[in-house]
């Protein structure tokens, strides 16, 4: 399903989601994705497999930071704005799983989570955190 970024341009995701359907846009405010196109697409250069579309919450951000993955501090040199609760972001599948195993998994949008995630996180775990967002960011 195409989305629209803040400039009004249409975004067309490539690939399939974990449901076997066309990949939806994850979020554009802030602009997410390894390729910063709003989608959790992946490719050979995405060594972190940034494929899970998360709706981050305070607990997830706190535990992730404690585990060495600070997602709340801005790093402009990498085009990273720093996240706040409620933001949608394409998170590394293995990192998300580590935080989930520590008891702080956050909601995910299956329709915007790339199918490559299934090589790292079992579908049975993903479905437990699935939400249907009201609107795209």
Image (spheres, helix red, strand yellow):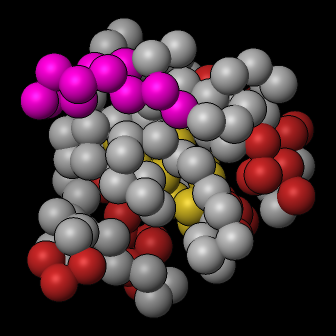
* Residue 78 visible to the viewer: yes
Instruction: From the top left corner, tell me how far across and down residue 18 is, in percent.
Output: 77, 34
Q: Which of 20 and 15 is in front in this view?
A: 15
Residue 27 location in percent, x, y? 34, 36
Q: Name the quadrant containing residue 95.
A: bottom right
Q: In this view, does 113 lie above or below 34?
A: above
Left or right: where does residue 120 sit relative to residue 132?
A: right
Say above or below: 88 vs 63: above
Q: In this view, does 46 lie to the left or right of 33?
A: right
Q: In which quarter of the image is the C terminus?
A: top left
Residue at the image position 60 percent from the left and 71 percent from the top: 46
What's drawn in magenta, residue-wise? 3-13
Q: Nearer the viewer, residue 35 or 100?
A: 35
Q: Where is residue 69 in the image (x, y as percent from the top left)?
A: 43, 81
* Residue at the image position 23 percent from the left and 25 percent from the top: 9
Residue beneath the point at 50% across and 84% down: 67
From the viewer's side, name the closer residue of 90 and 101.
90
Can residue 106 be seen at all in this image of the molecule? Answer: no
**Residue 24, percent from left and from top:** 54, 25
């Amino acid at each position: 399903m195409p989305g629209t970024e803040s400039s009004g341009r249409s975004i067309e995701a490539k690939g399939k989601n974990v449901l076997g359907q066309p990949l939806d846009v994850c979020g554009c405010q802030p602009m997410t994705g390894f390729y910063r196109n709003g989608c959790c697409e992946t490719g050979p250069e995405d060594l972190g497999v940034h494929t899970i579309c998360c709706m981050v919450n305070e607990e997830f951000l706190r535990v992730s930071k404690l585990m060495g993955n600070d997602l709340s501090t801005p790093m402009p040199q990498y085009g990273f704005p720093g996240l706040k609760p409620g933001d949608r972001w394409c998170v590394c599948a293995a990192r998300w799983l580590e935080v989930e195993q520590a008891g702080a998994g956050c909601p995910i949008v299956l329709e915007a989570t790339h199918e490559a995630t299934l090589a790292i996180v079992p579908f049975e775990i993903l479905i437990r955190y699935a939400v249907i967002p009201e609107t795209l960011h």
